[in-house]
Amino acid sequence: MQVVMEKAQILTEALPYIKEYHGKTVVIKYGGAAMEREDLKEVVATDIVLMKYVGLNPIIVHGGGPEVSRHMKALGMEVKFVNGLRVTDKETIDIVKMVLVGKVNKEIVSLINRHGKLAVGLSGDDGNLIVAKKKQMTDVDLGYVGEVAKINKEVLENLIKDDFIPVVATVGVGEDGMSYNINADKVAGEIAAALEADKIIFLTDVDGLYRDFDDKESLISELTLDECEHKLANNEISSGMFPKVEGCVTAIKSGVKRAHILNGMVPHALLLEIFTDQGVGTMISK
C-alpha cells in the first residue's frame, strides 16, 4: 500500500507542472550517451511521448557526430577537426547527410512512433527549415560547415498544429543550394528563439555546469543570463559546453523563459526536470 501511495504522491506533485506547461513548446537538444546507449534511447523516447500526451509540444533537435566519425573511419576517410569543428569537404557532407538524415533521424522517429503516429523527421532542406550560411574562419577553410542564417518556423508551427513531434537533423541548406553541417547546439538555440519556446533543454553527459569541473560538489543549480554571458566572455566555460551555453543565451535573449542543461545518463531526466519540484541539472533564466 505504501508503494501505491508514493506513486499517487508523484502524480499529485506533477499536476501543477502539467497545468503550467500544457500547450507550451519545449525544444530538446538530444545528444551524448542518451543518444548512443540503447537502454537510454528507449527511456528518452518514452519521456518525449509522455510529454506529448500530457499536452506539451516537444521538438527534438539532434546531431550525431560520433556516428558520422565511425562511418568515415569504416570507409577509410580521414576525420579532421579544427577548434572542435569537423572539416567537411564534399565527400564528407554526403556522409553527414547519409548518417544524420538517413540513419540517426529515422531511428529517433521510429523509437517515438512505436507509441503512436507522433513523430515526423526533418532536415534543413525540408521547406527550407534551416537556411545556412558558410562559417567563415580567418586561418582555415572548413568546407561545408555552416551557421544558421534563418529558421523558417512556419514548418515547425504547422507540424505542431497538426499534433506531430518534429525531429530535426541539423543539416542546413544554403542559398547556393548546397548542404551545410551545423552545430546541433546552435541550431537548437536558434529554433527555440524563433519559436519563442517556453523551455530549451540540452541533454549531455554531465550533471550541468560546475564552478570547478573537478569538484563535483560545485554544480551550479541556477544562473542568470548576465552570469552566463560573463562566463562566456571570460572563457569560464569548458570548450565542450561552450556551444550549449551559447545556445541557451541565444534562446533566452529571444524570449525563451528557461534553459536547462541536464545529464541525459540519468534515467527520465526530462521528466524529473519538467514535472517535479526539485528538478535536476543547471537552469539558466533571464
Image (cartoon, rainbow, N blue to C red):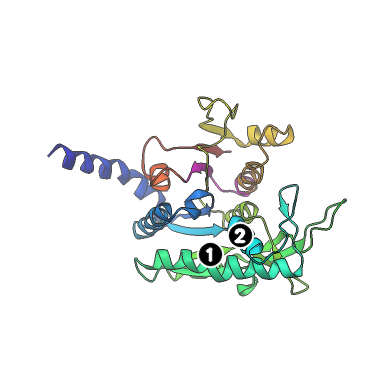
**Residue density around tag 1, few if under 14, some if 14–19, many if 20 or more, within 10 Å:** many
First-in-chain label (2 vs 1): 2
Query: Can residue 63 be spotted in the picture?
Result: no
Q: Does the magenta portion include 262?
A: yes
**Residue density around tag 2, few if under 14, some if 14–19, many if 20 or more, within 10 Å:** few
* Residue 276 on image: x %, y %: 36, 40
Look at the picture and state if 275 lies above or below 176: above
Q: Residue at x 41, y 50 (%)?
A: 21
Residue nearest the viewer, comparing 36 with 160? 36
Farthest residue in the left direction?
Answer: 1
Question: How far apart are the two marked residues, 2 and 1, measured between alpha carbons?
Answer: 13 Å
Secondary structure of residue under mark 2:
helix
Q: Does the magenta portion include 220?
A: no
Secondary structure of residue under mark 1:
helix
Q: Residue at x 39, y 34 (%)?
A: 278
> Horizontally, is 262 left or right of 2 in the view?
right
Q: Which residue is mark 1?
A: 104
Q: Residue at x 39, y 68 (%)?
A: 113
Give the residue type that dot 1 points to: Val
Q: Quadrant of the C terminus?
A: top right
Proximity of marks 2 and 1: CB atoms separated by less than 8 Å:
no
Q: Which residue is mark 2?
A: 70
Q: Quadrant of the N terminus?
A: top left
Magenta part of the chain: 251-264
> Horizontally, is 105 left or right of 5 in the view?
right
Look at the picture and state if 213 lies above or below 117: above
* Residue 146 on image: x %, y %: 73, 60
Give the residue type that dot 2 points to: Arg
* Residue 42 on image: x %, y %: 39, 57
